[in-house]
Amino acid sequence: EVQLVQSGAEVKKPGESLKMSCKGSGYSFSTYWIGWVRQMPGKGPEWMGIIYPGDSDTKYSPSFEGQVTMSADMSISTAYLQWNSLKTSDTAIYYCARLRSEYWYFDFWGRGTLVTVSS
Amino acid sequence: EIVLTQSPATLSLSPGERATLSCRASQTVNSDLTWYQQKPGQAPRLLIYDASDRATGIPARFSGGGSGTDFTLTISSLEPEDFAVYYCQLRSKWQWTFGQGTKVE
């Protein structure tokens, strides 16, 4: 069974750093792109970027490039999303999802990690 | 950048009725159009990919269609569990875009 297990909710202050994780199981983690999606409170999903764990190739949305960093460690089937300096506007749920490259859709999703940034 | 516009924003229907949701792209696209369902407190769930192919385990009452710039998701007869928000999503080159959603209530 394919599963993506995300790390737990975080409460941070503006300016703090954060690194969240997404651990895949039930499939060959290194051979599927993993995407990250932001969903701000009451809003629709926003695509942030994708990473290919096999070689750590990344593609970022222009809206998020330079704001976050995606990485992966295929030896432990885990992808990461990190911030160096959080803003209150980063408050959102962040989802990781597996990308099927045949038709470029996200077929399996993690449950999401809620990030609250508040002073 | 391609923009996806979903309409209507809210669809008020009763169980058993037919729901037709629209997703319009700002320019002609290929068929890499995907539909997701999202319920409160849950991650999006894949329904339809390649504009018209149902994902594994998705009931036959869900169907997708369209091409070019206009795509539709149809729920032939609403079940109580179908009341949710529906998003379309498109991939163009190395960018993915979501629509703003249609709430079926």
Image (tube, grey):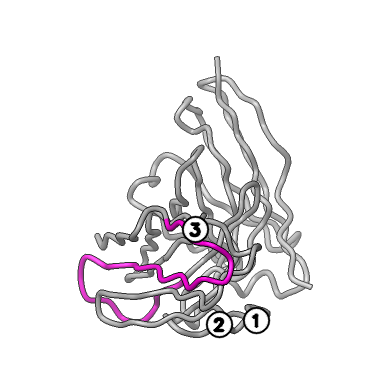
For the residues carrying marks 3 and 1, which lies nearer the camera in this image?
Answer: 3
Whether discs 3 and 2 lie on one chain: the answer is: yes
Residue at the top extreme?
A119
Tell which of A38 and B25 is nearer to you.
B25
CA separation in Å, label 3 and label 2: 19 Å
Q: Is residue A21 left or right of residue A95?
A: right
Q: Is residue A117 left or right of residue A46?
A: right
The residue identified by callout 1 is: B56
Image x and y of residue B19, in percent: 46, 70
For label 1, the crowd category at 10 Å Cα-Cα, with few meaning under 14, some 14 to 19 and many 20 or more, is: few
Tell which of A25 and B97 is nearer to you.
B97
Q: Find out whether the residues at labels 1 and 2 contact each other: C-beta distance under 8 Å.
A: yes
CA separation in Å, label 3 and label 1: 22 Å
CA separation in Å, label 1 and label 2: 7 Å
Q: Chain of mark 3?
A: B
**Circle 2 SS class:** strand
The residue identified by callout 3 is: B104
Instruction: Give above or below for A86 relative to B103.
Output: above
Instruction: Give above or below for A4 relative to A9.
Output: below
For label 3, the crowd category at 10 Å Cα-Cα, with few meaning under 14, some 14 to 19 and many 20 or more, is: many
